[in-house]
Amino acid sequence: MRFSIAAVTAAIAAASTIALGADAFVPPLPSSIHGRASLSLSKNGCGYTKTSFLTEKRWQPLRSTVNENEVAEIAAAIDGVDADDGDDDDDDDKTPTTATASSDKSVKTEEVKEGEEEFKLVLEEVPPASYEITSSPGAAPGGSGDVHTLTVHLGKPGHPDPIVIETGKIGRQASAAVTLTRGDSVLYSTASRDKDVRDVDFLPLSVEHQERFSSAGLTSGAFNKRDGRPGEHEILVCRLIDRPLRPLIAEGWRHDTQLLSWILSYDGARTCDPLAITASAAALWLSDVPLIKPVAAAMVGYVDGQLVLNPTLEQMKHSRLELTVAGTKDAVLMIEGAADFLPESLMVEAVAFGHEAIKIQCEGLEELAKVAGKPKLLDTIEKPPEGLQEAVDERYAARIDEIYGGDLSKEEQSASQSQLSKSVVEEMEELYPEERSAITAALKDLMCRRMFVKAKTHGTRIDGRRLDEVRTIDSEAGLFPRVH
């Protein structure tokens, strides 16, 4: 005996109507199984009852379409299905077939997959790699200054829009400010520094990046209509900006320095992450902050067997590589990304591919600084006292090696380092008064060098692990009775 899913549905609806009323509602199942019709009858002392029923993603009103005798007939048929379940290969007429929406869905999915055309990468032809600088005298608001524009063609197929960096028009009170345009995406970056020098032993650099709602034509719907705290992605972009720039600022720079980056307009075609790095680096390069070399960035994808520079979001859906590269004209400073089990040779090729685009941008920034850059402020950089580093090396290198080479626990090693640092400052201040920051920096430099020597010479880290070993990892399940 055959029966259709419609008949079973009607029977269940009738049973539900009898038990729950004509307009009873059944709640939907979890979203993970939306779109499937799950039908089940269970037998109890009172007869057959419905246990689950779903046809749509909304609450489903159940109404009677069959009488009680038909419900009993269908229930008896289902009993026959259960009894003959093992003989489904003998006779199609005797063996009922249970149809479900999930099976229909799987068949349709297979048909879609078979009918899908494989993604084919099509890259537009572009001008060769080049850059051009134009100056507009008196073009600043009020005619108070010149506006300088750098236009860079990256020369890679598929990237027809040039990168345009303009300075002198907006943010003229900052040490330097630029707008970077690619297509309909516009970023604004500024570099500023405090006039006073801080008495610290580190570079006081802060980076902020914000993807404004208004850049995509959106407005915050919350009570506070302004943009809120930075999102996770914005914080990660701040780190991408900081990593390649911090090491290139002159040693000894102790002015509070701030880099601000905003996305003012976004076309939705490509990610703006590499542009944020380039724009911030351009502002810092044109300012009086002593950045040693210009820095730029690029993103590399691997689509349809080809490396693609700054791929579109649509191309990234089919990419097996998402790689952000930042560096100078001479070297790569940072790589960040993920790959789908690509060979090492291809990864090296991808880094070199991205570096080619970085080179042309850095060359253009070098020329832009000649017409729009400020002289670097080097007068406030205090060099360490002559002979300080040599004196610290001679006095304390052996004691550092003893701490690193002993069988000390992590707590014991940390306590020994703290005690050493305290004694070094006390002893060296007698020879170099009022040079506490320089003494601390000299000790830190020595400790870093001795750590490197130990790893290179003996092949072990300061905690005793070899270079191919990881820390002991312990994991345990069921620590808490209620966490879900």
Image (cartoon, helix red, strand yellow):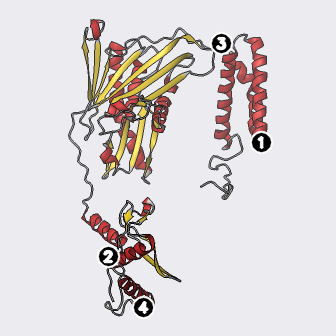
Q: Secondary structure at mark 4?
A: loop
Between marks 3 and 2 in the image, the one whose residue lies nearer the viewer: 2
Of badges 1 and 4, nearer the viewer stands: 4
Q: Quadrant of residue 385?
A: top right
Contact (CB < 8 A) between labels 4 and 2?
A: no
Q: Residues within 10 Å of mark 1 (few under 14, many from 20)?
A: few
**Of marks 1 and 2, which one's residue comes earlier in the chain?**
2
Separation of marks 1 and 2 at Cα, in angstroms = 77 Å
Q: Earlier in the sequence, mark 3 or mark 2?
A: 2
Q: Amino acid at mark 2?
A: Thr
Q: To which residue does mark 1 refer?
A: 409
Is 230 on the left-hand or right-hand side of 124?
right
- Mark 4 vs mark 3, CA separation in Å: 96 Å
Mark carried by residue 65: 2
Q: Is residue 168 visible?
A: yes
Q: Looking at the picture, how far across and down is residue 424, in whole percent?
A: 76, 21
Mark 1 in CB contact with mark 3 (< 8 angstroms)? no
Quadrant in which the C terminus appears = bottom right
Residue under numbered circle 3: 386
Q: Give the residue number, with chain letter if any, for mark 4.
A: 84
Q: Residue at x 73, y 23 (%)?
A: 394
